[in-house]
Each structure stands twice: as structure tokens, then as C-alpha cells.
Amino acid sequence: MTRNLWIALSFTMLISGAFAQEQTTVILLRHAEKAYDGTKDPALTEEGSKRAQELARVLTDVDIDAIYTTPFKRTRLTVAPLAGLKGLEIKEYNPWKLEETTDLIRNSAGKTLVFSGHSNTTPALINLLTDSDQWKQLDEKDYDNLYIVTLTESGVARVLQLAFGEKSVF
């Protein structure tokens, strides 16, 4: 390798390292299909259980540091297969105090976190993380969205919206 090429590569590595920032990754989703059993805390339907298994499959190769849910069966059951696969305890967050949840996320720099929420709390949490009002409440029959929010140390937030499992039927 010529001396000039070596100097150019060394300079490039030095510059890219100087601008590298620690990134926090937050994976958010609404719980899977819930049973309409007349209770305030229903479990998942058969379709919902299949979607929960698909979530675990989709995230198999992702290094996950923590999994959070609201205090409801449907949110816990949605991430239970993933938690089992990763050997992680499911932790709770308060869906009525999302500002506290954003503090928890911002204090988890460099981590990858999964949050299972609801049709209203998932987009609300994304809006808080991105300092926007772009994300609207999900339709009650919308279960297939998967949002990946990346946060840099400098506060820049990016959202990638994907889908997983069977397409939701509206």
C-alpha cells in the first residue's frame, strides 16, 4: 500500500471515529390481536399468539437488552415468546406516564429496547421520542406495524416503519 493511500485511510478512520455517536434503538409495536372476551384485560386470540411467535422469529438475530410492556396481558403475551427466546425478564412501563418512559429510554444510551404498547400509546411514545406529532393513533384492527426508532447522543431521532406477520385486515 502506498504511503499516501495509508495516510488517507488512517485519516478517514480517525474522522469517522471522531463523529461516531452512541445510538439507542427502540423497537415499538402494538400488542397482537386481542380476544374480545368481555373483560378489561383480555388475552390474545390464536392469530395474536401466532403474531407473537412471528415477532420472536423476526427479532431472533437482534441483540436486545430489555423488553417492556404495559401492565396488561395482551402486551405481555405479545412479547413473551421473544423474552423466552432471549432469556429476558419482561419489565413494565406506565402507559399513563409516557414522559417517564422517555426518560428511561434516554437513560439507556447504546441499548436496544423493545416496547409493547397499545393503539394510542405506541404512536404517542414515538411522537415524544421524535419531538413530533406525525404519528397518529392506530386503527383498532391494526396489529402488524413494527417501528424502529434510533436515537443518537446529539438527540437526532429516526423512525423506520415495518410490518411483520399476517397483514392486518381493516
Image (cartoon, rainbow, N blue to C red):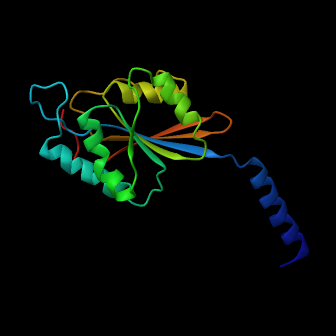
Q: Position of residue 82 (x, y in %)?
A: 34, 52
Q: Is residue 91 above or below residue 134?
A: below
Q: Is residue 121 above or below residue 51?
A: above
Residue found 50% across the figure and 25% down from its top: 100
Asked if residue 90 shows in the view, the reply is yes
Picture quarter with the N terminus: bottom right
Q: Position of residue 114 (x, y in %)?
A: 42, 43
Q: Is residue 72 above or below residue 48?
A: above
Q: Residue furthest left?
A: 37
7 to the left or right of 119: right
116 to the left or right of 27: left
40 to the left or right of 109: left
Q: Residue furthest bottom?
A: 1
Residue found 13% across the figure and 46% down from its top: 46
Q: Residue furthest right?
A: 3
125 to the left or right of 37: right
Picture quarter with the C terminus: top left
Asked if residue 135 shows in the view, the reply is no
Q: Position of residue 7 (x, y in %)?
A: 88, 67
- The quadrant where residue 39 appears: top left
Q: How many marks?
A: 0
- The quadrant where residue 13 appears: bottom right
- The quadrant where residue 38 appears: top left
Q: Position of residue 79 (x, y in %)?
A: 31, 46
Residue found 35% across the figure and 55% down from its top: 58
Residue found 31% across the figure and 30% down from its top: 118
